[in-house]
Image: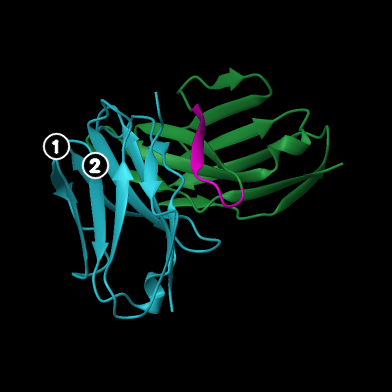
Amino acid sequence: GAGVSQSPSNKVTEKGKDVELRCDPISGHTALYWYRQSLGQGLEFLIYFQGNSAPDKSGLPSDRFSAERTGGSVSTLTIQRTQQEDSAVYLCASSLRSSGSETQYFGPGTRLLVL
Amino acid sequence: RKEVEQDPGPFNVPEGATVAFNCTYSNSASQSFFWYRQDCRKEPKLLMSVYSSGNEDGRFTAQLNRASQYISLLIRDSKLSDSATYLCVVGDYSSASKIIFGSGTRLSIRP
């Protein structure tokens, strides 16, 4: 079947605007993860979902960031009042279950540039 | 101290060479270990899981040393296509949020 898909692939926005990033996980995967990767840096964990609930939101950088998942499938990551330091690649991954031993399958990412 | 540390490299080696990198982790309770590969401007993809007894997949060998808290990746007979960043990943069965990605080691294979 299809892999993880993300949209848009690229987003350029002006400082202060809100953006919404979408992730469509692999069908049947109950766990979904959001990461952020700045240029030349490692992956920064943001949040994960088990089904529609997010047990751990501690990775979200600020209250401008929020995420939701509906129907145990698609997830959206919303960044309000974007700042230039939000510029990064936002990666979504899914796995069959949410234990720390599961292989994660990544989407191609959304490249966000805040001007 | 970072939870998962890797030498960022770059490692620049000739085709056919053997290259090895290590990754150290700070949480002694960590239970799952992986190597992912990330090509330039692409998403990470699982290369191999790392098992306690060590495991091999073709030219790739992964080892775990729990006493010293490090994992290693050995690549034999390196190919040009092995050029990528290799991410060390350490996890805990109890929670998916405890999966930590290292910053990666960049490998460049020259002809």
- Which quadrant of the structure image shows residue A95? top left
Q: Residue at x 14, y 46 (%)?
A: A55
Q: Chain A hue? A: cyan
Q: Which of these two is toward me, B59 or A23?
A: A23
Where residue B79 sits: x, y (%)? 77, 33
Instruction: Name the image quarter holding the C terminus of chain A.
Output: bottom left
Q: Secondary structure at mark 1?
A: loop
Which chain hosts label 2?
A
Query: Of the residues shown, which amino acid type is indicated by label 1?
Result: Gly
Q: Residue at x 26, y 76 (%)?
A: A81
Mark 1 crowd level (few <14, some 14–19, many ≥20, 10 Å Cα): few
Which residues are drawn in magenta?
B40-49
Figure check: A30 above or below B68: above
User: In the image, which disc is placed on residue A112?
Assistant: none
**Marks 1 & 2, CB-CB < 8 Å contact:** yes
Which chain hosts label 1?
A
Residue B27 can be seen, yes or no: no
